[in-house]
Image: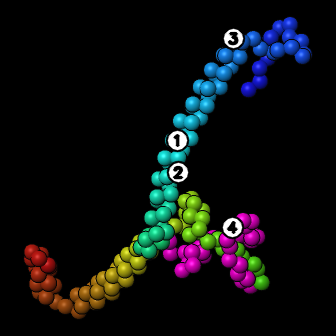
Amino acid sequence: MYIEPRPGFEPGTSALSGSETQVILNDVVKRVESLEKRVSEFGKVFELINISLGTRLRFSEYNCIYIDSKGYCKWFYWNTPLKDFEVFEVVEKGVKRYYLNVKKYPWFCLPCPKYTPKYLAETLSSLKTRLEALESQVTQLQHAISQQSDKELREALERLKRPGF
């Protein structure tokens, strides 16, 4: 904060009177109190973020499918090593790639658009398998229906209308 010297100020003399100093000190105190409140609010948000990230890494069903058994993210990599971070160097097709140990630096995962927990990937895979099986059954039913007479089709439709089918 820049303070304009009072009129008639000469270098080597006191720039502020006692009352001016008190006004400035009161303003500084208010600003510090405001900053303390903001830091406290940020601390609460940061704590919630850490809890969320901790859940992603502590419980195996919430682990991302891209994290290997040693904690390295296999989806995102850097072309140069990160200074002061634990990275794993891999050479693929003559190109060096550096993977970060996200179990040690979980906040790197926070903005990741590819975060996919294992339980969700397993559920989606299971649903896909079941859907493929249902599609196969529908195809078989369509084929069987095309081979049946009108009477047999009406009977099959009546059976489908029964409760509990």
Q: Amino acid at mark 3?
A: Ser
- Between label 3 and label 2, give the one nearer the viewer: 3
Task: Name the element at disc 3.
Answer: helix
N-terminal-most mark, 4 or 3: 3
Q: Mark 3 and 2 residues: CB-CB less than 8 Å, in contact?
A: no
Q: Give the Cα separation between the discs numbered 4 and 3.
A: 52 Å
* Among numbered discs 3 and 1, the one appearing first in the sequence: 3
Say if mark 1 contacts mark 2, CB within 8 Å.
no
**Which disc is residue 117 wearing?**
none
Q: Is residue 125 above or below residue 85?
A: below
Please state which amino acid type lies under the numbered disc 2.
Phe
Q: Quadrant of the N terminus?
A: top right
User: As drawn, is 110 to the left or to the right of 121?
Assistant: right
Q: Is residue 135 visible?
A: no
Q: Which residue is label 1 attached to?
A: 40
| Distance Cα–Cα, label 1 vs label 2 | 10 Å
Q: CA distance from mark 2 to mark 4?
A: 21 Å
Indicate the secondary structure of the residue bearing disc 1: helix
Q: CA distance from mark 1 to mark 4?
A: 28 Å
Q: Which mark is residue 19?
A: 3
Q: Which residue is mark 4?
A: 85
State which region is magenta: 64-93
Q: Position of residue 107 (x, y in %)?
A: 57, 60
Which of the marked residues, 3 or 2, is nearer the chain's N terminus?
Answer: 3
Q: Amino acid at mark 1?
A: Ser
Nearer to us in this view, 32 or 105? 32
Quarter residue 22 falls in: top right
Task: Give the residue at x 72% y 76%.
Answer: 97
For residue 46, which numbered disc appears in the image? 2
| Image-based side of 82 in relation to 64, left or right | right
56 with respect to 27 (left or right):
left
